[in-house]
Structures are given as structure tokens and as C-alpha cells.
Amino acid sequence: MKRLICVPEVPASQMVLTIITDEQLEAFADAVITKYQQDIARRKAAEPSPEEWMTRAESQDACC
């Protein structure tokens, strides 16, 4: 069985159960969403703006 959380003092043959509150779960979900939104914003910022893209006709003229 593969463990998702590494707890050094617990042998691999034992299960670890962590109980969290609703608030902790909500905070975790918010953190995941925020990180995802930041990643999307960073990727969009790295994309070239539409003005830098060539039209289909321009690309055909450039290659042939």
C-alpha cells in the first residue's frame, strides 16, 4: 500500500488517519484554488498577445 503522507515515526504497514475540521478543509480548498488561479494567470501572462500572432495567410506566405 502506498502512503500519500510521509510520517517517519509510523511504519509503512500502519495507516495514519488525520482528522481535520471543516474550517481546515475549507482553508485547504481555498489555498488550492488560489494556487490554481495564480498558475493560470502566470501562464496567460507568458502567452504572446494576439497582435503577435500571424494570420493564416501570413503563415502560408512565410513558409512557401
Image (cartoon, rainbow, N blue to C red):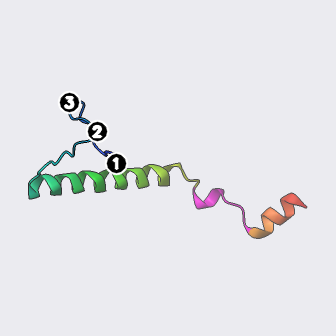
Q: Which residue is mark 3?
A: 9
Q: CA distance from mark 1 to mark 3?
A: 17 Å
Closer to us: 20 or 5: 5
**Label 3 near label 2: C-beta < 8 Å?**
no
Q: Residue at x 16, y 48 (%)?
A: 17
Q: Residue furthest front?
A: 13
Tag shown at residue 35: none
| Dot 1 or dot 3, earlier in sequence | 1
Element carrying mark 2: loop
Quadrant location, the C terminus: bottom right
Q: Please indicate whether residue 23 sits to the left or right of residue 50 in the image.
A: left
Which span is picked out in magenta? 49-55
Q: Which residue is mark 2?
A: 12
Reply yes or no: does residue 51 show up in magenta: yes
Q: Give the left or right position of residue 52, taking residue 58 as reference.
A: left
Residue 39 horizontal/vertical position (percent):
41, 50
Residue shown at 28%/39% (left/top)? 12
Residue in front for this viewpoint, 10 or 64: 10
Q: CA distance from mark 1 to mark 2?
A: 8 Å
Closest to the camera, between mark 2 and mark 3, is 2
The spot of residue 11 in percent (x, y) is 24, 35
